[in-house]
């Protein structure tokens, strides 16, 4: 069992490492590929491709994680974004930000009024 440094590994190496880990965990759970495929709602050849590092869709990967009760563990590795300390103070928290929409009516400048001012002194 090698410890792969994900920071310098290629995406192919990471894919292979995750596939091997999933397969070892499946064996640890004492599940056959047929049992895991049935629980995940996928075919055995699809599961085999995932576990052998031959490729799979994100949907397949998530179905297998869910069947193995690993979804929360995986989600724990993706942190929630936090406000940057360099963000302007007036900025709202990330969760409250919304897309700015253009205003439907833009005021149009009509120029100066040509009438002369009226004074009460006259």
Image (cartoon, helix red, strand yellow):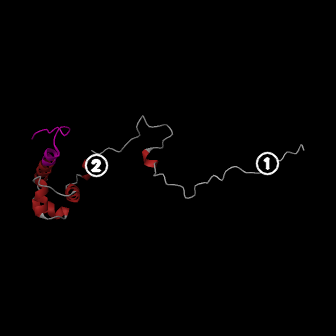
Image position of 17 (left or right of 122): left
Q: Give the residue at mark 1.
A: 116
Q: Is residue 8 magenta?
A: yes
Q: Quadrant of the N terminus?
A: top left
Residue segment shown in magenta: 1-17
- Inter-mark Cα distance, 2 to 1: 70 Å
The residue drawn where x is 48% and y is 51% is 100
Out of 117 and 38, give the one closest to the viewer.
117
Q: Quadrant of the C terminus?
A: top right
Out of 59 and 67, give the one closest to the viewer.
59
Out of 31 and 92, give the one closest to the viewer.
92
Q: Is residue 73 magenta?
A: no
Residue 7's disc number: none
Q: Is residue 50 visible?
A: yes
Question: Residue 5: percent from the left, percent from the top?
Answer: 17, 37
The residue drawn where x is 41% and y is 40% is 83
Splitting the image into 4 quarters, where does residue 47 fall?
bottom left
Q: Give the residue at mark 2.
A: 75
């Amino acid at each position: 069992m090698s410890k792969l440094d994900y920071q310098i590994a290629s995406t192919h190496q990471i894919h292979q490492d995750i596939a091997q880990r999933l397969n070892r965990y499946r064996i640890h759970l004492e599940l056959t590929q047929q049992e895991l495929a049935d629980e995940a709602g996928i075919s055995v050849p699809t599961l085999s491709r995932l576990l052998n590092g031959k490729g799979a869709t994100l949907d397949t990967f998530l179905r297998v994680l869910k069947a193995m009760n690993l979804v929360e563990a995986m989600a724990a590795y993706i942190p929630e974004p936090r406000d940057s300390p360099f963000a302007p103070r007036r900025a709202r928290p990330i969760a409250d930000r919304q897309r700015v929409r253009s205003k439907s009516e833009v005021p149009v400048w009509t120029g100066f009024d040509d009438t002369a001012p009226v004074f009460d002194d006259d």
